[in-house]
């Protein structure tokens, strides 16, 4: 499931991926992102993968559709985790989800939030 993190503010959206991600999770996340993009223009996202288990095969199509729909509207994506394969996702994210992507190991969410907020003053 996806949970919106309390630290989300302005055009920065934090998402905690927990357990198994299903197609229905994207059905809930998509309108949240659409609304924020309509309000802010472009967004920045943090994905916290601490409690992520897997994405069900039935969600793969929705996942790729999400990336295709929002790729040009997501400026930065921070992946927060502690598994080696999560660091590999950065290249994938850069091509399919966000213009910039960066991995933050050992659940360094504070550094991830700081990176996402960089340059906000100039962009405002």
Image (cartoon, helix red, strand yellow):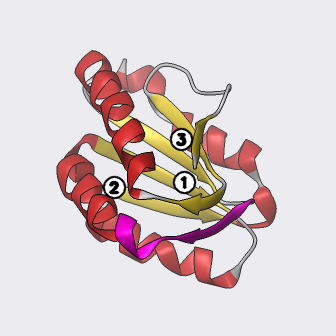
Near-viewer residue (2 or 15) = 2
Query: Mark 3 vs mark 2: which is more N-terminal?
Result: 2
Query: Mark 2 vs mark 1: which is more N-terminal?
Result: 1
Residue segment shown in magenta: 51-59
Near-viewer residue (13 or 27) = 27
Query: Is the C terminus in the top left, top right, bottom left or bottom right quadrant?
Result: top left
Residue 78 at x, y percent in the picture:
54, 54
Residue 95 at x, y percent in the picture:
28, 69
Gap between marks 2 and 1, in whole Å?
Answer: 10 Å
Q: Is residue 78 above or below residue 123?
A: below
Near-viewer residue (84 or 33) = 33
Residue matched to label 2:
98
- Can you tell which quarter of the image residue 81 is in? bottom right
Q: Residue at x 28, y 53 (%)?
A: 66
Categorize mark 3 by other alpha carbons within 10 Å: few (<14), some (14-19), many (20+). Answer: many
Gap between marks 3 and 2, in whole Å?
Answer: 12 Å
Residue matched to label 1:
78
Q: Residue at x 34, y 43 (%)?
A: 27
Disc 1 is placed on an element classified as strand
Near-viewer residue (39 or 75) = 39
Categorize mark 1 by other alpha carbons within 10 Å: few (<14), some (14-19), many (20+). Answer: many
Residue matched to label 3:
116
Query: Mark 3 vs mark 1: which is more N-terminal?
Result: 1
Disc 2 is placed on an element classified as loop
Gap between marks 3 and 1, in whole Å?
Answer: 7 Å
Q: Is residue 118 above or below residue 71?
A: above
Of discs 3 and 2, which sits in the foreground?
2
- Can you tell which quarter of the image residue 39 is in? top left
Q: Residue at x 75, y 43 (%)?
A: 110
In this rendering, position of residue 90 left or right of residue 100: right
Residue 97 at x, y percent in the picture:
32, 58
């Amino acid at each position: 499931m996806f949970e919106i993190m309390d630290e989300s503010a302005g055009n920065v959206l934090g998402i905690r991926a927990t357990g198994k991600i299903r197609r229905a999770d994207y059905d809930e996340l998509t309108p949240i992102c659409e609304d924020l993009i309509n309000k802010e223009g472009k967004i920045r996202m943090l994905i916290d993968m601490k409690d992520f288990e897997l994405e069900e095969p039935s969600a793969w199509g929705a996942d790729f559709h999400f990336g295709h729909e929002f790729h040009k509207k997501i400026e930065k994506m921070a992946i927060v985790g502690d598994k080696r394969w999560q660091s590999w996702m950065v290249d994938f994210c850069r091509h399919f989800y966000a213009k910039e992507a960066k991995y933050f190991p050992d659940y360094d969410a504070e550094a991830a939030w700081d990176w996402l907020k960089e340059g906000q003053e100039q962009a405002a």
